[in-house]
Amino acid sequence: MAESKVPDNLLYTEEHEYVMKVGDDEIVVGITDWAQGELSDVVFVELPEVGSSFARMEAFGTIEAVKAVSELYTPAGGDVVAVNEALGDDPALVNRDPYGDGWMVRLRVNDTTELDGLLSPDNYKALISA
């Protein structure tokens, strides 16, 4: 299998979500290249409604692939300010472009210090190569 991409400008969870900071208190969340590779062909993504609130590491949706269904977790508590509607019509965007068009939700974070415990790119690389 090809080596997974782990961009240096992102943070990561042990559950294989990535976090892209897009403002002082907003983040974009999706699943990593490694995770989409493990799932294989994504056939359905269930995402929350805009305005939904979640606690840190609470399941905010599910991702369904040919091989498995997995829950998606919020890396920090907050409110959903946008969801990637394109995934409804084309869930395979997650496979083709996990860090771009395959993003899942945008959250306004309640407490940005919750992001301090996330994995650095190097620590995430160590996790997936273990």
Image (cartoon, rainbow, N blue to C red):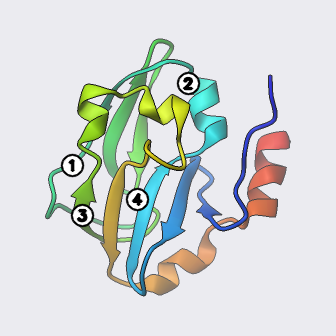
What is the C-alpha distance between the residues marked 3 and 1?
A: 8 Å
What kind of residue is marked 2?
A: Leu
- On the image, the x and y values in percent for residue 31 come to 52, 45
Tell me, yes or no, if residue 129 can be seen here: yes
Residue identified by numbered label 2: 39
Q: Which kind of residue does numbered mark 3 sit on?
A: Val
| On screen, residue 123 above or below 77 | above
Return the x and y of residue 103 as percentages of the image width and height. Answer: 42, 49
* Amino acid on which the number 1 mark rests in the picture: Pro
Residue 46 visible in the current orientation: no
Which one is earlier in the sequence, the residue at label 4 or at label 2? 2
Q: Separation of disc 3 and disc 4 at Cα?
A: 10 Å
Q: Quadrant of residue 23?
A: bottom left
The answer to whether the residues at label 3 and label 4 have Cβ atoms under 8 Å apart is: no
Residue identified by numbered label 1: 48
Q: Which residue is mark 4?
A: 74
Residue nearest the observer in this picture, 18 or 118: 18
Where residue 80 sits, quadrant-wise, is bottom left
Side of 37 where 60 appears, left or right: left
Horizontal and vertical percent position of residue 44: 32, 25
Q: Label 4: state its secondary structure.
A: loop
